[in-house]
Amino acid sequence: MSPKRFSFLYPLAAIVLWAGNVIASRLSAETIGPQAITFYRLLLAVLLMSLFVAGPAWRNRAAIWPRLGQFAILGFLAMCLFQSLSYLAAQTTTATNMAVFTALSPLLTVALGAVLLGEPPTAGTIGGGVLAFAGLAYLVGGGSPQALLAGGVHPGDALMLAAALVYALYSVLLKRWRLPVPGWQSTYMQALCALAVMFPAFLATPAPLRALNAETLPLIAYAGGLASVVLPFLWIRGVERLGPSRCAIFMNLLPVLTAAAAIVMLGEPVRPYHVIGGGLVLAGVAVAQTVRRPLPGMRPAPRT
């Protein structure tokens, strides 16, 4: 896989694992509590990463220790709050909807960046945002956006929107702080901090909802091993070879792969409104990623 023409396989394989993680989240909804599986996946991920990251992180402690508070915030957002919201959402929404909301994160990152980092919005951000919002209304309304006014948003969809916003905030803070720590060490420290935060929530979970058995162990192994260690490795390698912008485009495949897996593994039906609404959301994200022209009267923010 050394030739550069095969570099696309890194982000593609990462998205395949991400789609599998959405399926694992849906499967976990009836077998284990969201706080419990979040804690277990963090524990397994930390144990696995300790094998090759603990030593370098300890030697780099002079750079890591002053930034422990930032690692704690990042770990809480991405590894505690985002994951817990996703597992909660899996109880009342479909895997396809979960993937569509997750794929919305790059667009929300651009929008939050405009607010928090002072980055001027582009024509693509505005146009893509309108297109994605229309797609979400069509998707969540089951093909009838006016139904949202009568019945409101399903709890699972609202939770996934909150999760996508949390992940977007995480991405913006990561960009703003630009921590001078290697990627694996940063991920490791975030996971350690998140593990400490999740421990009280794990203890408060009723015993039946944190039991380890033949149903829960494979889900924890997938979430803590493949999704938390192998997936970041593949994504980091992809970013190194292709750049973050080109890798972000692969996020648009997440709903497609997840829907295909949900049909086969979960028996979830894919309705026309999934295709139309999800397609509009992905089109909006693609427009925001590709149309970089600033709005009239706007100037690009100076590099700092």
Image: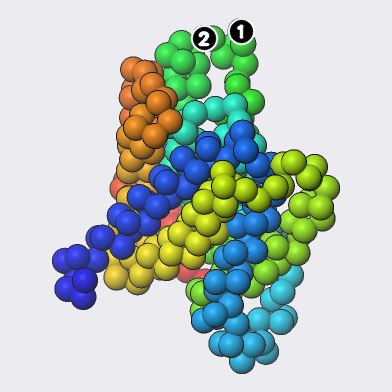
Residue 90 visible somewhere in the drawing: yes
Q: 126 or 149: nearer the eye?
A: 149
**Which of the labelled discs sits on residue 190, or is there none?**
none
Kind of residue at disc 1:
Ala
Residue 288 visible somewhere in the drawing: no
Provide residue 72's location: percent of width, then percent of height. 71, 65
Chosen colour scheme: rainbow
Q: 77 or 292: nearer the eye?
A: 77
CB atoms of marks 2 and 1 within 8 Å: yes
Going by the image, does 268 lie left or right of 155? left
Tell me what residue is drawn at x 54 percent, y 80 percent: 51
Kind of residue at disc 2:
Gln
How many dots with numbers? 2
Question: Label 1's element?
Answer: helix
Q: Is residue 39 above or below residue 259?
A: below
Q: Quadrant of residue 135?
A: top left
Q: Which residue in the protein does label 2 denote?
A: 146
Most distant residue in the bottom direction? 59
Q: Which residue in the protein does label 1 denote?
A: 150
Tell me what residue is drawn at x 42 percent, y 14 percent: 143
Provide residue 75's location: percent of width, then percent of height. 65, 61
Provide residue 225's location: percent of width, then percent of height. 50, 62
Label 2: how many Cα within 10 Å (few below 14, some 14–19, many 20+): few
Provide residue 62's location: percent of width, then percent of height. 67, 89
Tell me what residue is drawn at x 59 percent, y 26 percent: 92
Label 1: how many Cα within 10 Å (few below 14, some 14–19, many 20+): few
Q: Quadrant of residue 33?
A: top right
Tell me what residue is drawn at x 63 percent, y 61 percent: 42
